[in-house]
Image (spheres, rainbow, N blue to C red):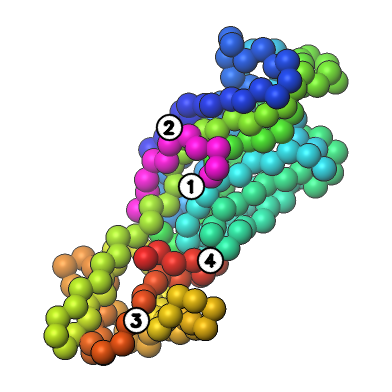
Amino acid sequence: MQTLASVIVLACGLVPMAHGIPCIVESTNHGGGLFSYTFRRGDDLYVWGLGTNFGTVYLQSYGVVEVQEPLGWTHSISPSGQITWTVTNGVAFLDEPVTFTVRSCLTESAIYPPDASVSAISSVVFALPERIQILGGGYQAFDWIGPARPSFTIERTNTVVVVRWSAQALGLQLEACDSLDSSGLWTSVTNVPTLVDSKFTVMLPAIASTRFFRLATPCTQSPDN
């Protein structure tokens, strides 16, 4: 499944954005939790340039277990799973196709709308063909296909708490905590999940005190509920 990105562009200089966009972004779901993101120049005579000390490409992901980028690029991952790519040396232009790949333990996918807070190119635009003159700077948000956050439900009867999540979400660890303030400590729930109606299911004895649950992925430890 592939989508052609729509964009929102903020120009902080004299970038002539009215006739087109600096970059076309294509995202592809290859199945099995593997996603790729390809960036290439649009039709107008300018191009995004990112340098060692300026410019990023970033997008929010979930359950990330592996990230690959072309030579000359590097990445970091925030605790929430946001991946940020930067250039290691010199200036790289999003001109010829530049592809990044992300592998997630979450195999279900979702289409995410353009939102500069979670997915965007943020840098400066250079004039073509010389790529010397900087026309201005800003950001370009884009839509993309990525791992879907797993469905996660908690039900309680008088004696039992039942926690369920999607069977397509592999490798997740159920964790529990008694408090969400600084005194709280997340610990792994050791009960082995069973598969019931295509859902991983854990049944726990109900207790009188409040208890919180979350799903932790191999790389990020942010709550899913």
Mark 4: amino acid: Thr
Is 184 situated above or below 61? Answer: below
Mark number displayed over residue 3: 2
Q: Which of labels 4 and 2 is toward the front? A: 4
On the rendered image, what quadrant is the N terminus found in? top left
| Inter-mark Cα distance, 2 to 1 | 12 Å
Q: Which of labels 3 and 4 is toward the front? A: 3
Could you tell which of marks 4 and 2 lies nearer the N-terminus? 2
Name the residue: 32% across, 82% down: 210
Could you tell which of marks 4 and 1 lies nearer the N-terminus? 1
Name the residue: 16% across, 67% down: 197
**Over which residues does the magenta segment extend?**
108-118
Local SS, label 3: loop
Mark 3: amino acid: Arg
Q: Position of residue 134 (x, y in %)?
A: 80, 21
Mark number displayed over residue 35: 1
Q: Position of residue 96 (x, y in %)?
A: 67, 27
- Residue with the mark numbered 4: 220
* Quarter where residue 182 is shown: bottom right
Residue 139 visible within the image: yes
| Inter-mark Cα distance, 2 to 3 | 41 Å
